[in-house]
Amino acid sequence: MLNKIQSMKKNIQQSLEQLGYRKTLTRTTILRALESFNRPVSVEDLVEQCQDLNLTTIYRNLHVMEEHGLIRSMQFTSKAKHYVIAEQDDTKHYHYIRCLQCQKVDQIDFCVLEKIKISTNFTIVNHSMEFTGYCPDCAPEIVEHSSTHSH
Ligand SMILES: [Zn+2]
Ligand SMILES: [Zn+2]
């Protein structure tokens, strides 16, 4: 994941410059923040990370960068939009897993689509998968909590 972002850096810088120098600093700040999380992040995460930027500025720049394909957003069931830096390779896609406790989202970098194609012979046009559970930080707490209440 990290290597992928590293290799994209030059490309992102170019795209940012094409979008206009005036706003490059703001957008670089947002992209750096996205990168630092190393997982899909919500606008709230970004507000916390980029304290120099206000909510409106962050929303506006996310919108522009998404339109230009620099970042991608995903909507989780009844949850706020999350953002990631876009893949260079359009054919590549990811699925996500969300923690039910802290709402952290992580990326799953493989898909069972090909296997399903082979086993069903279907021509698949669309698919979606969402995983939920407890992240490594929250799982011990949940286990501890449930064990003290079980009889
Ligand atoms: Zn968690
Ligand atoms: Zn997939």
Image (cartoon, rainbow, N blue to C red):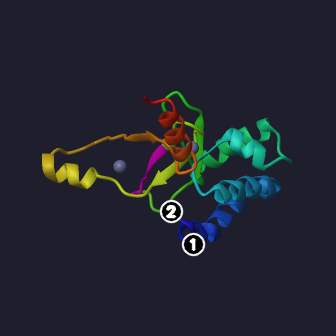
Q: Residue at x 78, y 37 (%)?
A: 55
Residue 39 percent location from the top left of the image: 57, 53
Which of 114/108 is in front?
108
Tell whether position 23 is magenta.
Answer: no
Q: Residues within 10 Å of mark 1 (few under 14, many from 20)?
A: few
The location of residue 50, given as percent across then percent down, is 79, 49
Mark closest to the chain's N terminus, 2 or 1: 1
Asked whether 95 falls inside the magenta stretch, the response is: yes
* Residue, far front: 151
Amino acid of disc 2: Gln
Query: Label 1 sits on what residue type?
Result: Ser
Q: Which quadrant holds the C terminus?
A: top left
Residue for point 41% across, 41% down? 131
Q: Quadrant of residue 44?
A: top right
Task: Name the residue tied to disc 2.
Answer: 88
Asked whether the beta carbons under mark 2 and mark 1 sit within 8 Å of each other, the answer is: yes
Q: Secondary structure at mark 1?
A: helix
Residue at 41% across, 40% down: 130
Q: Over which residues does the magenta segment extend?
A: 91-97
Q: Image quadrant of residue 6?
A: bottom right
* Residue with the mark numbered 1: 7
Q: Is residue 151 above or below residue 132?
A: above
Determine whether the residue tagged by mark 2 lies in a helix, strand or loop: loop
